Amino acid sequence: MKVIELYNKLCEIIPTSLSCPWDKDGLESCPEPDREVKKVLITLDITNAAIDRAIEGDFDVIVSHHPVFFGGLGVMNALTFDGAKAVRLAKNNIAAMSFHTRLDAREDGVNDTLARLCGLKNIEIVGDDKIARVGELDEEISLEDFAKIVKDKLSWGGGEREATLSVCNVNGRVKRVALVGGSGGDMMNLAKDAGADTYLTGDAKHHEYLGAFDFGINLICAGHFFTEHPVCEFLDKTLAEICPEVQREIYFSNQVITL
């Protein structure tokens, strides 16, 4: 399968129609559209370390969730941070394709994956952009016990692989949970409107933490990376189905260490 064929196939599965209007994902680097794809690196973020791995491992394509040029590239100038990444990708003939809010919204994408990991059932779409989800646990449990489940399911071990949770304990009990992976602090109103007693997201601003008490719902922030990284398994499975002959590797792109 060629690079452009792979991107077009993924767009059929993760369509741009699901993207938020402001998003900047897509085929961000494509030095050689007709290059045959033999190896794909899957990552949440296209960091310089991820590009290092792609170069060292002779990967043809990097597939990511977050766009590498989120603000738009502007110019390919190696004297800028984004420009230097663009130059490295082009010089090493590495294609980069990202699937951001459309992967948040897609069935079985970021938020459905997160909901199922945390044990939610009867999962429903919440909000006009189809990103947020709400679901229920089999039975009501304490906020402390639910937080332990979240931490256990999202952590990959110690150091940079361990999720760190920030919790606002408003009512202490958990049954109906709304969630948005990544930066979802500004969407807490959707959780309230959906009748949730608890809202799970990646990160929030200070006033959004305080807002949990105004909304009257528990808030758990489990880290932007950790609430979204599990979707790499979905990307890996999808690639295995559409191009089984291609070698795949999931790269753990988190660079924040928990002390």
Image (spheres, rainbow, N blue to C red):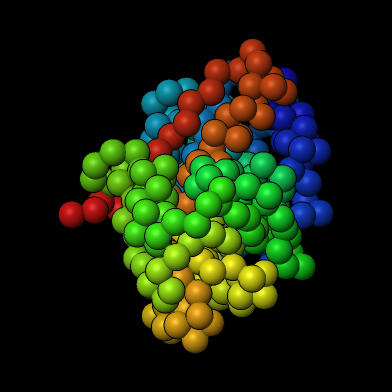
Which of 53 and 131 lies nearest the eye of the viewer? Answer: 131
Figure disc tally: 0
Q: Is residue 93 visible?
A: no
User: Can you name the residue that lies furthest to the left here?
Assistant: 259
Residue 230 position (above or below residue 168): above
Q: Quadrant of the C terminus?
A: bottom left
Q: Quadrant of residue 60?
A: top right
Residue 54 position (above or below residue 123): above
Q: Is residue 233 visible?
A: yes
Residue in the picture at 53% in, 52% down: 139
Which of 23 and 163 lies nearest the eye of the viewer? Answer: 163
Residue 217 position (above or below residue 55): below
Q: Is residue 114 left or right of residue 17?
A: left
Residue 220 position (above or below residue 51): below
User: Can you name the residue that lies furthest to the top here?
Assistant: 245
Residue 106's spot in the image, x, y percent?
Answer: 71, 48
Residue in the picture at 35% in, 59% down: 144
Q: Is residue 159 left or right of residue 234?
A: left
Q: Quadrant of the N terminus?
A: top right
Residue in the picture at 40% in, 60% down: 142
Q: Is residue 168 left or right of residue 122?
A: left
Q: Quadrant of residue 237?
A: top right
Residue 207's spot in the image, x, y percent?
Answer: 43, 84
Which of 8 and 116 lies nearest the eye of the viewer? Answer: 116
Residue in the picture at 45% in, 65% down: 173
